[in-house]
Amino acid sequence: MRSRLPKVLHPICGRPMLAYVLDAAREATGMRPLVVYSPATEQVREAFADEADFALQQEPRGTGDAVRAALQAVPDDVEEIIVTNGDKPLLRADVLGRLLARHRAEHAVMSITTHRVPASAPWGRVVTNADGAAVAIVERKDEPSARTGDGFDANVGIYAFDLGWLRGALPRLRPSDASGELYLTDLVAMAASEGSRVSVDDESADPRPLAHVKDRGDLAAAAAELRRAIAERHTLAGVTIDDPATTFLDATVEFAEDVTLEPNVVVRGTTRIGRDTVIGSGSQIIDSVVGERCEIRASVLESAVVEDDVRVGPFSHLRPGAHVGSSAEVGNFAEIKKSRLGPRTKQHHFSYIGDAEVGADVNIGAGTITANYDGNAKHVTRIGDGAFIGSDTILRAPVTVGEGAYTGAGSVVTKDVPPGKMAVGVPARIRDKRPAGEPSATQAAGGDR
C-alpha cells in the first residue's frame, strides 16, 4: 500500500477494510472475532478494541506462526475455527457459512475455499485427488515451468479447522528454506500424508467476495463494488438514486423511504436523511441529520442538523455545529458555523453566520456578517424573533439584536439593539423604528440622494 497506515485500516465506504471482514466472521459464527496483530500494527488493536479479541504475533514469521499465536487466546472448549485474511472487504457471511457446512459434512480436519482462475494467475494452486479432497497447495514460485491449460483452482486464504487436530499439527510445521517462515498452506500436505481429509469449497460461481486488496488499485476496485452493493440496498428499501455510478454512499448512512439522490452526490459518515427529501446534484452531506421534505441543492453539510421542510442552497456551506430550524431557508453562498437558526428564518444569500443564536421568523439580508472573532476569542451574536437584519450589516460580537428590531443596510452594529428599535449607521446608532407608511428623510426632502 506504500502507506504509514496498516493495510487493513485503509477506509472503504466510510469504514476500515477490516471492519467488513469482522462483520462477516461474526455473522457466520455468532462469536466474537479474534484478530492477530503485530507490534507494527498496534493501531489495529486500538481501532477495534470494542469489536474483537486480539492475539499478538511478536515477529512476522508467516501465516502458520500467526495462527499459532491466535490459538493461545482461543478457549480450550472451542472445537473448530475459521481462519481468513483481513484484506477481504467484500467477504460475506454466506461464503464462510458454506465452507463451515462442508467442513462438518465431510468430517474434515481442514477445509479450504477455492475458485477457478486463469493459468497465468499468481495464486497458490490447490491440488486435489480423485475424491475431490485437497492433497497439496503449490505456490507459483515453487513451479519452475509456466502453468498451462484452462486455469486452476486457487487458494484464496479462507480456511476451517478442527481445532483439536490443528493444535497437534501446528508444532510439526517446518520453516520454509527460502524465508524461514511457517506457512499455513503446508498443513494440507501434512493432513493428506496422514490420511486425514481436507475438503474443498469451490466459490467460482461468484468469486467477488473472495477478492483481496494488495494495493490501492485493488482498494479502489473493492470500493466501487461495495458502493454498488450499498446503492442497491438503498434502492430496494425505497430510495431513488438517479445515477448510482456517480453517487458515493458510505456504508454507515441511513435514508428513509422516498428520499431522492440526484447525480454527483456524496453522503458520508453517520448521516441520516428523512422521508421525501431531495439531495440535489453536487451536494456533499457528511455526519449530518437532514429532516423530512427538505431540498439540499449543490451544498455542503458537515456535522450539521437540518429540521423538516428546509431549503438549502445552491452553493451553501453548513459547517460543524450548524442547526437550521423547520421551514427555514438558506440560500446562495450562505455559510453557517456553530449557530442555530430558528423556524422560518431566511438567510438567503452572500452571508456568514457564526457562533450565533438566531430566533424564529428572522430575515437576514444579503451580505450580513457576524464578526465573531476578535483575534483572541470567539464571541456570540444573539438575534431575537422577528428581527430584520438589513443588507451588508456587520454584527460585531458579542452583541444582541432584540425581538422585532431592525438594522439598516450597511450598518456596523457594535452595541445591543433593544427589542423593537432600529440600528442605523457606522457605527450604528439606535433609533425608534419609523411607523409603517411614514416617509423616509430622503422622501420628505423631495427625492432620492
Image (tube, helix red, strand yellow):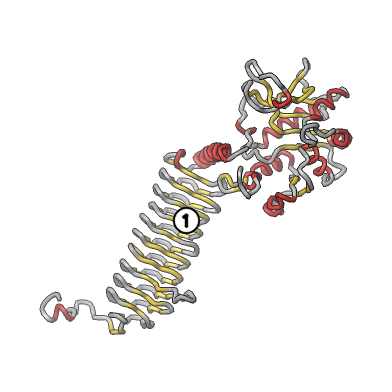
On screen, residue 168 above or below 285: above
Where does residue 230 sit, x and y in percent of width and height?
A: 54, 41
On screen, residue 14 above or below 222: below
Q: Residue at x 45, y 51 (%)?
A: 284
Q: Where is mark 1, residue-wise?
A: 290
The quadrant of the rendering that contains the C terminus is bottom left
Q: Is residue 260 visible?
A: no
Where does residue 172 sit, x and y in percent of width and height?
A: 88, 33
Label 1 element class = strand
Q: Is residue 376 left or right of residue 156?
A: left
Q: How many marks?
A: 1
Where does residue 326 sit, x and y in percent of width and height?
A: 42, 62
On screen, residue 377 above or below 115: below
Q: Residue at x 78, y 24 (%)?
A: 136
Q: Is residue 106 visible?
A: yes
Q: Amino acid under label 1?
A: Val
Task: Pick whichever, 372 or 145, lies toward us.
Answer: 145
Q: Where, by quadrant of the figure, is residue 374 drawn?
A: bottom left
Q: Is residue 177 left or right of residue 382?
A: right
Task: Pick whichever, 39 or 19, lies toward us.
Answer: 39
Task: Pick whichever, 332 or 128, lies toward us.
Answer: 128
Q: Residue at x 74, y 45 (%)?
A: 35
Where does residue 1 sit, x and y in percent of width and height?
A: 61, 42
Label 1: few (<14), some (14–19) or many (≥20) C-alpha neighbours in 10 Å: many
Q: Where, by quadrant of the figure, is residue 429 drawn?
A: bottom left
